[in-house]
Image (spheres, rainbow, N blue to C red):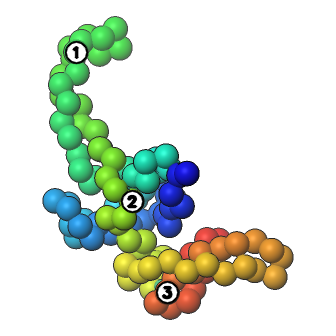
Amino acid sequence: MAPKMHVKAGDKVKVIAGKDKGKEGKILSVVTSSGRVIVEGVSVAKRHQRPTQQMPQGGIIEKEAAIAGSNVMLVCPACGAATRVGHKILDNGTKVRVCKKCNEVVDK
Ligand SMILES: [Zn+2]
């Protein structure tokens, strides 16, 4: 079963482990099947692109590689801290994520 992710696309996160430790960026996409995330500007790999019809010159393109979701923490939009994520059920039944530091709802 795919691991439950604490972050989702569009979240701002901080890398807490690995070679990009300390970097912050926005999540571009989440690979739920492997529990990995792709974060803007983090784990960027240069790739040599063969010439194609769209890019006749070929060249080097930079592309973010997926990193383990457990290596990132959510940066709370309310208090700005890298935080663990809690959950809360709203009166209308919607499940939302909350910041464990300031208790603000992260999902709007
Ligand atoms: Zn907070």
Q: Residues within 10 Å of mark 2 (few under 14, many from 20)?
A: many
Quarter occupied by residue 70: bottom left
Q: Which mark is residue 100?
A: 3
Q: Residues within 10 Å of mark 3 (few under 14, many from 20)?
A: some
Residue 47 point in image, percent of width and height: 20, 30
Asked whether mark 1 lies closer than 8 Å to ligand 1, one says no
Q: Amino acid at mark 2?
A: Gly
Residue 103 point in image, percent of width and height: 56, 89
Residue 42 point in image, percent of width and height: 26, 54
Asked whether mark 3 lies closer than 8 Å to ligand 1, one says yes
Quarter occupied by residue 92: bottom right
Q: Residue at x 34, y 56 (%)?
A: 68
- Does residue 36 lie above or below 79 as drawn? above
Q: Which tag, 3 or 2, sits closer to the chain's start?
A: 2
- Left or right: 37 in relation to 97: left
Of residues 15 and 32, the one nearer the viewer is: 32
Given this view, does label 3 or label 1 mark the residue nearer the observer? 3
At mark 3, the secondary structure is loop
Quarter in which the C terminus is drawn: bottom right
Q: Which tag, 3 or 1, sits closer to the chain's start?
A: 1
- Left or right: 90 in relation to 20: right
Q: Amino acid at mark 3?
A: Lys
Q: Residue at x 24, y 37 (%)?
A: 62
Q: What is the spatial separation of the Cα atoms under label 3 and label 2, in whole angstroms?
A: 18 Å
Q: In the rendered image, which residue does mark 2 sit on?
A: 69
Q: Which mark is residue 50?
A: 1
Given this view, does label 3 or label 2 mark the residue nearer the observer? 2
At mark 2, the secondary structure is helix
Q: What is the spatial separation of the Cα atoms under label 2 and label 1, in whole angstroms?
A: 31 Å
